[in-house]
Image (cartoon, helix red, strand yellow):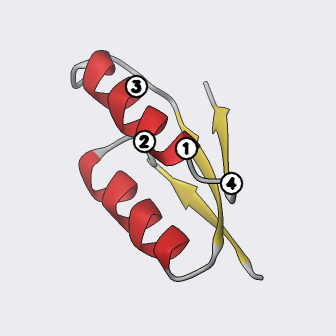
């Protein structure tokens, strides 16, 4: 299995790319700042969906 580092994983595009990569069997290491430019609750909801997958790891960056 190959791993992919995905930045901005809590955003709309990043979360969709993460979902697709996970479905294709990749391991996804996601990073995001989780700033409040967009609603943080929405970002957290997207992350919770991704965290259900075994091959997903998330790191908050600042």
**Occupied quadrant, residue 28:** bottom right
Q: Where is residue 61? Give x, y as percent.
A: 63, 30
Q: Where is residue 5? Give x, y as percent.
A: 64, 63
**Residue tagged by mark 1?**
52
Q: Where is residue 42? Give x, y as percent.
A: 26, 26
The kind of secondary structure element at disc 4 is: loop
Question: From mark 1 to mark 3, how far is it between C-alphas?
Answer: 13 Å
Q: Residue at x 65, y 40 (%)?
A: 58
Q: Dot 3, how many residues are within 10 Å of its Cα: few (below 14), some (14-19), or many (20+)? A: some
Q: Nearer the viewer, mark 2 or mark 3?
A: 2
Q: Where is residue 12? Give x, y as percent.
A: 25, 49
Which circle's residue, 1 or 3, is located before the other in the chain? 3
Question: From mark 1 to mark 2, how far is it between C-alphas?
Answer: 6 Å
Question: From mark 2 to mark 4, how far is it between C-alphas?
Answer: 11 Å
**Residue tagged by mark 3?**
44
Question: From mark 3 to mark 4, how far is it between C-alphas?
Answer: 18 Å
Residue 54 numbered tag: 4
User: Contact (CB < 8 A) between labels 1 and 2?
Assistant: yes
Q: Viewed as shown, does residue 34 lie left or right of 28?
A: left
Which circle's residue, 3 or 4, is located before the other in the chain? 3
Q: Residue at x 22, y 19 (%)?
A: 39
Q: Nearer the viewer, mark 1 or mark 3?
A: 1
Q: Dot 1, how many residues are within 10 Å of its Cα: few (below 14), some (14-19), or many (20+)? A: few
């Amino acid at each position: 299995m190959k791993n992919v580092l995905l930045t901005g994983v809590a955003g709309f595009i990043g979360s969709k790319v993460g979902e697709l990569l996970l479905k294709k069997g990749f391991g996804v290491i996601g990073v995001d700042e989780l700033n409040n430019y967009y609603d943080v609750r929405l970002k957290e909801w997207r992350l919770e969906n991704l965290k259900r997958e075994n091959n997903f790891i998330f790191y908050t960056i600042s």
